[in-house]
Image (cartoon, rainbow, N blue to C red):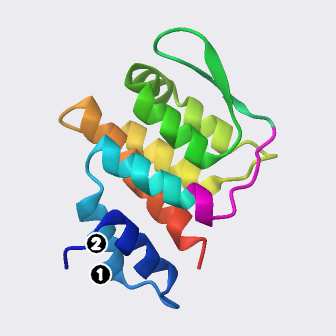
Amino acid sequence: MNLSINNLFEHIQNQEVKSTRMYQIVESMIDDNDCFKNLLNKIKNYSRNPQYNPPFYFNLDKGGGKRVNNIPELLELSIDNPNKFKEYMEKGDFEHWLDNIEIRETELANIAQGTREKNFPNDDERLHYFLRECCLVLIGRNP
């Protein structure tokens, strides 16, 4: 089944029950940064993304920083700042922020922890795994 990201996302939105096959299609399609950005744009427009307090302060690769108030923002900054993503992932900063008592994103915190602990052939694979797993959770939350 070869669908564009837009068609795929619309198809997922229209499903009352999300099948394992649909998740496999998403996993196979979103394997590079441009595809992730396209999918994140769809998620931002479609899903309910709570504003987290406290925000996560994400330092950028080229200096400066931004406040992250929700998961799509975190994922987008991770794509654009792979060196800082690696640093935050290695220190466990994402999982600690997500598991904060006020945020309570235990499922996503577990994904961050699993991503940190798992062995990957390179940093891009680690980033793509984290992005894919988080996107699948966000899609699954928005029937």
Q: Please state the horizontal and vertical placement of residue 94, each as a whole percent of the image.
A: 57, 36
Residue 115, located in which quarter of the rendered image? top left
Query: Local crowd at mark 1 within 10 Å, few (<14), some, or many (≥20)?
Result: few
Residue under circle 2? 24
Give me the disc on residue 21: 1
| Label 1 residue SS | helix
> Is residue 119 visible from the viewing direction of this image?
no
For marks 2 and 1, give the CA distance: 5 Å
Query: Local crowd at mark 2 within 10 Å, few (<14), some, or many (≥20)?
Result: few
Amino acid tagged 1? Arg
Residue 2, located in which quarter of the rendered image? bottom left
Q: Please state the horizontal and vertical placement of residue 126, each as a whole percent of the image.
A: 32, 39
Q: Residue at x 34, y 64 (%)?
A: 5
Q: Is residue 121 above or below residue 14?
A: above
Give me the disc on residue 110: none
Q: Please state the horizontal and vertical placement of residue 122, each as a whole percent of the image.
A: 21, 32
Left/right of residue 123 with respect to residue 75 in the rendered view: left
Left/right of residue 69 with respect to residue 77 in the rendered view: right
Amino acid tagged 2? Gln
Q: Is residue 55 above or below residue 6?
A: above
Main SS, magenta residues:
loop
Q: Residue at x 44, y 24 (%)?
A: 81
Q: Residue at x 49, y 52 (%)?
A: 40
Callout count? 2
Left/right of residue 42 with respect to residue 98 in the rendered view: left
Residues tagged 2 and 1 counted as in contact (Cβ below 8 A): yes
Q: Quadrant of the C terminus?
A: bottom right
| Label 2 residue SS | helix
First to last magenta residue range: 44-53
Q: Residue at x 67, y 45 (%)?
A: 70
As rendered, which of 76 and 126 lies closer to the eye? 76
